[in-house]
Amino acid sequence: MKVTGEHMKLDNPWKNLDFWNSEDFVHSTDRDYVKDMANVESKKRIILTAPPVPYIGNPKAMLVFLNLNPGYNIDKEYNEQQYYDRSDERNHEYLECYRKNLLHENYEYPFFCLDPKFEEGYGSSKKKDFPGYGWWNNRMEQLLGNEYDHKAVSRKIFCIEYFPYHSTSSPDFSRHIPTREYNFQLLDEAIARKATIILMQGPQYWKKRLHDAHGAPYSYYRTIFRHNLTKDNLVFDDRRDALREIRKLLENQGDV
């Protein structure tokens, strides 16, 4: 932990994850809090053999999404787990992006799920992309259209997940996990620099955190129907055209 001025600044806990050699991908400080969640026989089971995504993108971006947790495709034909096999050389470039993301070191494509090289995977199913690419690319197309500049946008957005581990359905997100404190710090820093916040999923969790930490209402865009980023779903408090303002923000924001 570092002291900055009057505030205690947390070190990035994910520096301590032995990404390439650990038995699974759970952080040591989280293990006692989540190990039982990986053993339940239901869709709420968390997947500890998939790399965690506590956040993704540029941590200094002026457009910040708040989400719940990374999903997991249980379709046997798609076989998402094959892309997380560290012994398969076909996955090394993709997995290295996960590792660098944890350290905020993906400089070319900070939001690496928008990198077009991950559009074509190697699976046998009709769904061909690497995990994450299709989901996030679809949402950026909703915001920006089909011809958006993947690399430029990748450098201008950041997403913070409330829970870092993958699941097919919603586990108990209210459970405390130590690594979440670093995510809260990243959110506090975004608010301090007056970033635009888009609350995608989990408003009951994020609103409580924002109220407890900042003690007052805050200005944010919010999605009102699941996680689709369309004009009808993006609502601003005074009913301004949120979609147009977000596009303008991305157009005017230089690299940070």
Image: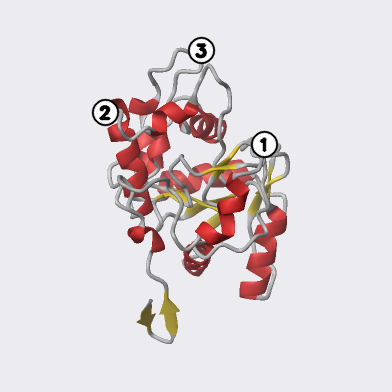
Q: Are marks 1 and 3 in contact (CB under 8 Å)?
A: no
Q: Which mark is residue 126?
A: 3
Q: Which residue is mark 1?
A: 43
Task: Tell me, yes or no, if residue 199 can be seen here.
Answer: no
Q: Quadrant of residue 142?
A: top right
Q: Are marks 2 and 1 in contact (CB under 8 Å)?
A: no
**Residue 204 at x, y percent in the picture:** 72, 57
Q: Amino acid at mark 3?
A: Lys
Left or right, 170 with respect to 125, comes to right
176 relative to 140, above or below: below
Q: Secondary structure at mark 3?
A: loop
Distance from disc 1 to disc 3, alpha carbons, whole Å, reads 23 Å
Distance from disc 2 to disc 1, alpha carbons, whole Å, reads 29 Å
**Residue 155 at x, y percent in the picture:** 36, 46
Which residue does the image show at 55% across and 20% down from the upper left?
76
Q: Quadrant of residue 92?
A: top left
| Figure coloring | secondary structure
**Residue 199 at x, y percent in the picture:** 63, 51
222 relative to 112, above or below: below
Which of disc 3 and disc 1 is earlier in sequence? 1
Task: Tell me, yes or no, if residue 143 can be seen here.
Answer: yes
66 relative to 41, above or below: below
